[in-house]
Amino acid sequence: MNESLLTSPSAKEDRDDLLVYKSIDIKHTKQTRIFGIPIHDLNRDEAVARILSYIEKKQGPKHILCVDPLKLMAFRLNSRTRSIVNKADIILPEGGGLIWASRILGTPSHLKERISIIALMLDLVRLSSRSNFTIYLLGIHSSSLEQVFFNLQKSFPGVRIVGRQGGSFGKQREALVKESLRKSAPDLIFLGMEFPYQELWIRENWSYFSKAVVVGVDSSFDILARRERKVPEWVERGGYRWLWHTITRPWLLLRIAATLFFYFFVVFSYLRIPYLFLRPFHFMNRKIQ
């Protein structure tokens, strides 16, 4: 794992950060709609401030949903996943393509910035280590989860990770995970699964999260544990990590087609060109039933 990425600032910096977050106005948050999908117009500090407020006020369970162009089109085309959008408490733009789309389409409120899931996660871990919030890690790959757990403990002294579960979830294993979540009642849950199973799992197990804020982190555990091929820095800065992963895994042709569909959809909408001939792309609807 990149040690510089996980370097924890001094206690003084932590205290200053906490005051800064608490001074941010989170009462008046605008939303931008892209193809009918609402996305909160927040920068990273504002997102952290709102999550911090949820935790301190015990307002959970709350669902933090990060979307990229692929997820957005899946939400638009599939009624099962669209219900996830309607119930999410914060929806953040993880892909740079959404920032571009909000400007091209002339939405009333342009999205401020692309918010990296990993950066958001580490901001929350850092604050948790100073504020005594408890964290639960839940993902698919046990080896990645253990590596991330070890590095977080090393880089953020005092962080309270009260549970971690990785691996495939059979019925018996899933029952144990749910009971562990119920008993530990964490403040923050980081859940890393494939889309859309991650989002569906959150909704299907909502009653076990108590007052927790649940953040879907997708493949972040694998990336932090270096299981996935490192993304070039210029790609990460541009917010196109999702596109890099699609291109470097050519067997995922479905995702490539869905990515192109999003950009066509934006351009055709901007030019007011009918796109009925793109209806064959509704294969995405069948794919995630």
Image: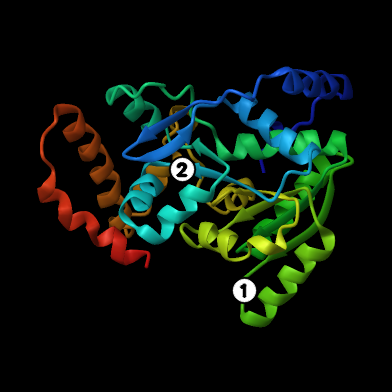
Kindly report which numbered mark, 1 or 2, lies closer to the viewer in this rendering: 2
> How far from the left and from the top, in percent, is residue 267?
20, 32
**Residue ID at (80%, 37%):** 56
Going by the numbered disc 1, the residue's amino acid type is: Phe
Residue at the disc numbered 1 = 169
State the count of labels: 2
Choose between 278 and 209: the one closer to the eye: 209
Mark 2 surroundings within 10 Å by alpha-carbon count, few (fewer than 14), some (14 through 19), many (20 or more): many
Q: Earlier in the sequence, mark 1 or mark 2?
A: 2
- Could you tell me which quadrant the C terminus lies in? bottom left
Residue 67, label in figure: 2
**Residue 156 showing in the rendered view:** no
Relative vertical location of residue 275 with respect to residue 123 in this rendering, above or below: below
Residue 103, placed above or below residue 34 = above
Residue 52 percent across, percent down from the top left: 73, 34
In the rendered image, the vertical position of residue 195 relative to residue 115, given as above or below = below
> Local crowd at mark 1 within 10 Å, few (<14), some, or many (≥20)?
some
Residue 158: x, y in percent? 89, 41
Q: Nearer the viewer, residue 155 or 101?
A: 101
State the residue at coordinates (12%, 48%): 276
**Disc 1 vs disc 2: Cβ atoms closer than 8 Å?**
no
Q: Secondary structure at mark 1?
A: loop
Q: Quadrant of residue 175?
A: bottom right
Q: What is the residue that sits farthest to the bottom in this orientation? A: 172
- Quadrant holding the N terminus: top right
Q: Disc 2 marks which amino acid?
A: Val
Quadrant hosting residue 142 = bottom right
Q: Could you say which is closer to the camera, residue 166 or residue 84? A: 84
